[in-house]
Amino acid sequence: MNLVELNDVTIANNLVHYSLSIQQYERLGLVMDNQESQLLLDLLSGRIYPSSGNFQLNAELMFKRDTDGMYDDLTVKTYLKLFFELAKTRIDLKQVMEIFHLDSEMKTKINNLSVDQKERLHLLRIYLFQPKILLLESPLRKLTSSGAKLYLELVDYLRTKGITIVVIASSLDELQQLSTVCYRINNNRLEKIDSSATKNNLKIVSRRNEQIIYFDVSEIDFIESINGVTNLSVAGKYYPVNFTLNEMTAKLVSEDFFRCHRSYIVNLKMVLSIENYSKNSYTIILKNQSRTELPLSRTKVTEIKQLLGTIQR
């Protein structure tokens, strides 16, 4: 059964063509940045309408955004009682609180919960409504390693209850933990990712507090080193790594990356153009949403142009 069908759908002022069927029980993942995710969720929720193509939503859908807030001054018990009544559900709340490992937090104010606990509470709130389709945006990104493990178990539990879960994230590695089939936008079309082509890809690890995030190198727009801190730039956000820029250069020697400046490494597949604003001033323009500008050392101009002529975009 197709729960959602998009047949060559386009949206006004957007070049992307969406062709996608979401089937019941399918484990689907979508590689999208924040803007792409917002556009799709607006379409699926009825906030905007397609300008061409065919779109059918055949089942109840709910979604959890990465930026969703909560009623921080309420206790967990009061918060869940509110949504329990709204959902008019027969679910055994006491039992499900134990399954979601929140039973000992009933009297705790939401503001005092850990990030891991808040994300499980979000998931439980949605589960009370028993949607046929649940879209999760970057569900693992903020979690600790132990929190992510428990969250994955809960996603599997929801699937046993007949909920089809679609995951949207900018990190392919995050999607591969939650999905068996993944899509990304390529050449203005939503296309299936060849799993065999990504199986052996190099992963770069970012650690922030207790979070551990794995990035496929193809997801990285550029890498910068500012004041001794090395950061990956992925979908407009920065993630620190415990490597110097020299170490990152060595690590990426067999990949399509180039040390364009003493403080920057650029993904060559993200280069839109090279601009020469003065005799000795060169700038790389990236083909990301913000058209990021990176400095290019004058001595590297010839080399990068040669490399750009050899890589497959």
Image: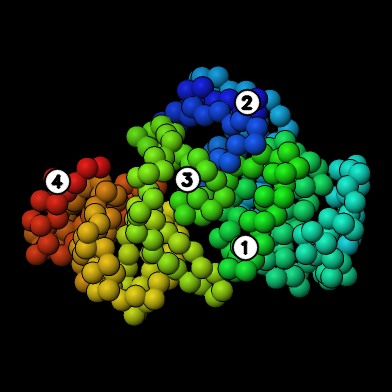
* Relative horizontal placement of residue 133, taking residue 75 as reference (left or right): left
Q: Which mark is residue 310?
A: 4
Query: In front: 295, or 201?
Result: 201
Whether residue 309 appears in this view of the structure is yes
Mark sitting earlier along the chain (1/4): 1
Residue at the disc numbered 3: 31
Q: CA distance from mark 1 to mark 4?
A: 41 Å
| Viewer-side label of 1, 4 | 1
Question: Residue flagged by tag 4: what amino acid is it?
Answer: Thr
| Viewer-side label of 3, 2 | 2
Q: CA distance from mark 3 to mark 2?
A: 21 Å
Residue positioned 32% across, 68% down in the render: 224
| Viewer-side label of 2, 1 | 1
Label 3 packing within 10 angstroms: few (<14), some (14-19), many (20+): many
Mark sitting earlier along the chain (3/4): 3
Mark sitting earlier along the chain (1/3): 3
Asked if the residues shown at circle 2 and circle 1 are in contact, with their CB atoms under 8 angstroms apart, the answer is no
Residue 284 percent coordinates (x, y):
23, 55
Residue at the disc numbered 2: 2
| Viewer-side label of 1, 3 | 1
Residue 19 percent coordinates (x, y):
49, 27
Asked if the residues shown at circle 2 and circle 4 are in contact, with their CB atoms under 8 angstroms apart, the answer is no
Asked if the residues shown at circle 3 and circle 2 are in contact, with their CB atoms under 8 angstroms apart, the answer is no
Locate the N terminus and report the quarter of the image it occupies. top right
- Secondary structure beneath label 1: helix
Q: CA distance from mark 1 to mark 3?
A: 21 Å
Residue at the disc numbered 1: 149
Q: CA distance from mark 3 to mark 4?
A: 26 Å
Question: Residue flagged by tag 2: what amino acid is it?
Answer: Asn
Question: How are the colours assigned in the image?
Answer: rainbow
Residue positioned 34% across, 34% down in the render: 187
Question: Residue flagged by tag 1: what amino acid is it?
Answer: Lys
